[in-house]
Amino acid sequence: MKKLLLSTAVAMTFATTAQAADPVKLGVLLGFTGAIESTVADMGPAADMAVAEVNAGGGILGGRMIEVVRGDSTCTDSAAATASAERLITSDKVSGIVGGDCSGVTTAVLTNVAVPNGMVMVSPSATSPALTTVEDNGLFFRTAPSDARQGAVMSDIIMGKDIKKVALTYTNNDYGKGLADAFQKSYEAAGGKVTASISHEDGKADYSAEVGALAAAGGEVLVVAGYVDQGGKGIIQGSLDTGAFDTFVLPDGMASNKLGEAIGSDLNGSFGQTPGANNAGAQVFEKSAKGFNGTGPFTKETYDAAALIMLAMEAAKSTDPKDYKSKIMDVANAPGVKINPGELKWGLLILANGGDIDYVGASNVELIGVGESSGNYREYEIKDKVMSTVRYR
Amino acid sequence: MEGMEILNALAVFSNYVLVPALTYGSQLALGALGVTLIYGVLRFSNFAHGDTMAFGTMVVILFTWLFQSWGISFGPLPTALLALPFGILVCIALVLLSDKFVYRFYRRKKAAPVIFMIASMGVMFVMNGLVRFIISPKDIQFRDGERFIIKAREFKQMFGLDEGVAIKVTQGITVVIAIVVVIALFWFLNRTRTGKSMRAFSDNEDLALLSGINPDKVVMITWMIAAALATIAGTLYGLDKSFKAFTYFMLLLPIFASAIVGGLGSPLGAIAGGYLIAFTEIMLTYAYKKVAEYMVPGDEWEADSLMQLLSTDYKFAVSFMILLLVLLFRPTGIFKGKSV
């Protein structure tokens, strides 16, 4: 028994001395498989990029490297996402989580795993309005804005084109329903009419039934609150093929040039909005994105989510979530020196010396309220099959 | 004028119900045929069928790209049709390999069907990963050539109607190929010696073995046909919609529903099941507002509801209700297949 105690004590001493040089583990919980796997293919590397940048600059807290541990959220399966998050926290011992991605699994992971374990989560892409009011003990942040704001922006854009009657379809999950409801509320308040609001399931073989119902309801344009490589695309294709609708309104889940590639010139004239800001950081980020598409949806937000966690750790001089959770808002907002992508090293240096930073990052980060992005949107129109910016809102 | 109204109603109905359901039904029928053949001869539910379709289609896409890079095209028809035979061959090779390394072992041991089924799930995951690894999990569009046989707008002008019917080239190809394949398959099963031996093996394995039928050959031919059907079904589906590994995996559900409704093991049942599932899914959830407006005499009547029997949310529930009803009242399926 004595021997055992002794060896345990020795082992523990080793463990504590080793810890100073141990890498800090950062969980990246995104849907690497499942409904948005093709979007995440670009988001995952964006988080890696921020980490690689910090490591190349000498790490955080006087030389500790960051190590990314990936977990699969599957986007739709809450049980699988919860299990992944539990593994990240209890077995990999991560100090913070970038994620989750889709609103439904993010809510599940937050309430079932992150809050009980006191783990900080910074989601790059969960946009459901419901996440604003969820009980989070100050542990949850998002670099993406709530869809309550996007709904209002979308309504303004459509009204601005003098379109008074629309049909609406949404992907049947927290994201789609949240955005559709937010939009319908704003649009009807502004005097518009939603002829039908019809949900669609993702990953289905055929969308003829949905297209038929939407066509029967009619409307000048069809608002598609879905995903670009899922049901959203299927519905647009079906609508164009049957001649049901010619013009589509495409919110963030649909905002990708892949849509134009897949559908072709029939998509010209469709329009929409996606989180985005016209800042220098975005251009720097897109230029330095290597091995993935830096213009992909939510890539900038993912980079920023990873950067915020690392900066907050430095500001708090600790990798413990309960110490650094209160620092996230500080490093994200004014006052302080503005920090763009590629300048994380300087940001860390300023923080190490007790200075203040205002992290701008790739997506013009400004956290409001309970810690979510204030929401800069890029209004775009499809011209020649690609998204072309109309203006920023 | 009255006659025009009815024609308009018919056009709306064809455009949104008839044409899409016929296409979707053909795609399901071809998939269900493969499932039902495996069930009939090898006696297990092959869960890897959806991913076999994905694998075959992936090979077709790779060959399509190769042909396109050589400048070969098929005129107004998609190049993928030229690549189809190559896809079928590679898919057959993979399926035979999976039989050699996985299923044969269990066959020798005379394992229970449920063990085969679980083994097929393993094969499913391997194929799933293989496809994603080779061609990525992304959505891929590989259709080329002409898009439409007739566009909605052209149809309106041609017949002077207010409503158009659009028929895509891919929809035409799907229905034509489905008919050709079904005729060929039935000819093979009913007229050729090998086909007859397959049916004999399916009906009564012991008797078939007694009368000197070589079981290995029957199994091999069955796999080959199933792989060919899977590749054809997958390619037609991908041409009409698009290729995505995830969607093919999800196709498994309606395909199994079709095969079971029709009667597992019965090729005729698989076809009937495919169309039944497709038509009921679309017809029960279609909003008949426009059709009714044209059908009701009087000019300015406007329906104040969508006239929808069921919300499209229940689309999936419809196929499972049919499945449930069929299994309750006719456990062997409409066409007397094997009971599950």
Image: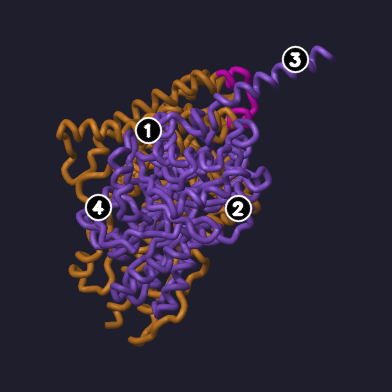
Chain colours: A purple, B orange
Along the line of sight, which residue is nearer the eye, A122 or B48?
A122
Circle 1 residue: B56
Residue type pointed to by label 4: Val
Query: Can residue B265 be seen in the rendering of this structure?
Result: yes
State the separation of the CA atoms marked 1 and 2.
Answer: 50 Å
Residue under label 2, please give it: A138
Q: Mark 4, mark 3: which one is toward the viewer?
A: 3
Label 3 sits on residue: A7
In magenta, the rendered stretch is B105-117
Q: Quadrant of the N terminus of chain B?
A: bottom left
Q: Residue at x 29, y 46 (%)?
A: A283
Q: From this viewpoint, which residue is outermost toward the top?
A: A3
Asked whether the residues under marks 4 and 1 belong to the same chain, the reply is no
> Which amino acid, by three-letter code, is at mark 1?
Gly
Q: Chain of mark 1?
A: B
Camera-nearest residue between A130 and A213: A130
What residue is drawn where x is 57% and y is 31%?
A: B43
Is residue A220 rendered to the left or right of residue B196? left
Secondary structure type for disc 1: helix
- Check residue A17 for magenta coloring: no
Give residue A6's position: percent from left, percent from top: 78, 15
Q: Please state which amino acid type lies under the numbered disc 2.
A: Gly
Say if mark 4 contacts mark 1, CB within 8 Å: no
Up the image or down, A217 lies above or below B334; here it is below
Q: Which residue is mark 4?
A: A386
